[in-house]
Image (spheres, rainbow, N blue to C red):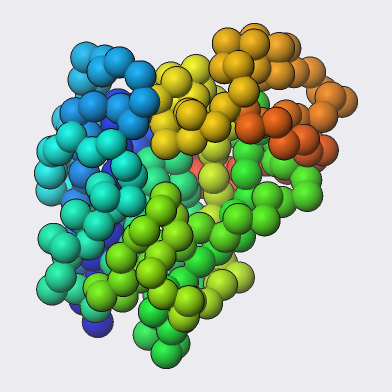
Amino acid sequence: MLIGAITPVYNDEEIVGSAIKCFRPFVDKYIALISEIPYYGEPQPPDRTEEICRSLDVDIIKGRWKKDHEQRNRGLELCSDCDWIFNIDADELMLPEEVEAIIKLAKNTKYDAIGVNPEVYWRNVYNVLRPKPTFNPILMTRTKVRFNNVRNIDSSRYAICDAQMHHIAWCEPKNIYKKIKTYVHANECKDIEHWYQKNYLGWKEGDRAIDPMGNSFDVEHKPLPEELRKLLGVV
C-alpha cells in the first residue's frame, strides 16, 4: 500500500517540523502546500516554514489559496499515485503507535476516509478542553476523495479511528495571535483583539476556556505525551 501525506501551511515555522516528524517515517511521499497568502488578513513576509520542510525531505508546492479545502485538494491531486493519503495540519501530532493504528485500519477498511476525535490543547501543552470538541477531522483518505469545505469531504463513507491525535490548537508554542488573524475560521471569530487579550492571555487556572467562536469548555490538566513535547522543544 502506497501512502502519501499532505500538509497545508502558512508561516508555521514554530510547529510544522514537529508534525512532519510524526508522520514522515510512515509515508512514501510527503508534500507541504505552502500558501503565499493567508486565508484572511494581509500577507506577511515568509518565515522559515519552507526551509524546515525541505530539511525533512518534504516536497514543496507553492500557491495562493483562499480556501483550505482547495489547498488540500491540490495535494490530493499530486498524490494520485498513492492508495491512501494523510491530511495533516501543522498543529496535529501523533505518537508512532497511533499513526500505525490508523494505517492498520486503512489497510482493512471498506470506507473512503478515516477521522479521529482529537485531544485539543489549551494555552499550553499541559491542558486539554473538556468535554472534547465534537468535530472529528478527516485525517486520512483514499485518493478519489475530495474536500468540499474545511475538513468535510464529498463522501459519507468514513470511519472514526480510536487512535489519538493531539491538536495543539490553542496553545504555545504556536503563535496564537497570528493564527486567529489569518486562519480559515477568522471570519467566524468574535472581536479577535478582545478575545486574545481577555480570554487567551487573561486566562488563568480555574477559569473556563472560551474559544474565538464563543464556545466554552472546562479545562483539565493532561500533559501532551513526553515524546511529542520533546518534538516541540517543550519540556
User: Where is 137 relative to 189, above or below?
Assistant: below
* Residue at the spot 42% in from the left edge and 50% down from the top edge: 150
Query: Is residue 186 found left or right of 215 in the rendered image?
Result: left
* Residue 157 coordinates in the image, percent (x, y): 46, 80
Q: Is residue 91 left or right of residue 30?
A: right
Q: Position of residue 22 (x, y in %)?
A: 39, 52
Q: Residue at x 48, y 35 (%)?
A: 185
Residue found 60% across the figure and 55% down from its top:
135
- For the point 48% across and 29% down, the residue is 187
How many numbered marks are there?
A: 0
Vertical comparison of 170 with 109: above or below: above
Q: Position of residue 136 (x, y in %)?
A: 57, 60
30 sits to left or right of 129: left
Note whether residue 140 is visible.
yes
Residue 231 seen from this side:
no
Pick the front one: 160 or 42: 42
In percent of width and height, residue 17 lies at 32, 38
